[in-house]
Image (tube, rainbow, N blue to C red):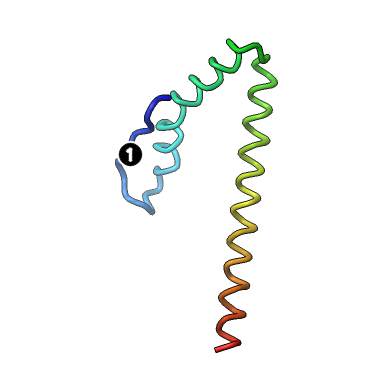
Amino acid sequence: MTNVPAPTVPAGNENRHLFCQMAVEFPLQELIEAAVKAGWEDTEVLTAIIEVADNLMLAQGSNAELDALLKALKRNLD
């Protein structure tokens, strides 16, 4: 798998998300090509990537909410 380049702009830079997109585009294209070569249809692969990314984002949000709740509970117990 292709390495993803490190960020070239600091956190908070207004264009950082665009640089991140550029950094992951080539490795993602390679993943799509490999999946199609394995026999998956390109629309299946793209749909799967979108759904996996959505699930990961939802899980990240849930984890952040749980962390906040646990910190609040700990403060109340201390």
Residue at the disc numbered 1? 6
From the viewer's perspective, tell me whether residue 2 is left or right of residue 52. Answer: left
Tell me the quarter of the image containing the N terminus.
top left
Q: In the rendered view, would you say 73 is above or below 67?
A: below
In front: 1, or 24? 1
The x, y position of residue 41, in whole percent, is 68, 14
Count the numbered circles shown.
1
The furthest residue to the left: 8
To which quarter of the image does residue 66 belong? bottom right
Tell me the quarter of the image containing the C terminus.
bottom right
From the viewer's perspective, tell me whether residue 58 is left or right of residue 28. Answer: right
To which quarter of the image does residue 43 belong? top right
Which residue is at 64% across, 37% downward?
52
The x, y position of residue 54, in whole percent, is 65, 41
The x, y position of residue 51, in whole percent, is 68, 35
Element under label 1?
Answer: loop
Which residue is at 50% across, 21% downward?
29
The x, y position of residue 11, in whole percent, is 36, 52
Q: In the rendered view, would you say 73 is above or below 31?
A: below
Which residue is at 40% across, 32% downward?
23
Q: For mark 1, does the 10 Å Cα neighbourhood hold few (<14), some (14 to 19), or many (20 or more) residues?
A: few
Q: In the rendered view, would you say 68 is above or below 9?
A: below
Which residue is at 38% across, 54% downward?
12
To which quarter of the image does residue 74 belong? bottom right
The furthest residue to the bottom: 78
From the viewer's perspective, tell me whether residue 75 is left or right of residue 12. Answer: right
Going by the numbered disc 1, the residue's amino acid type is Ala
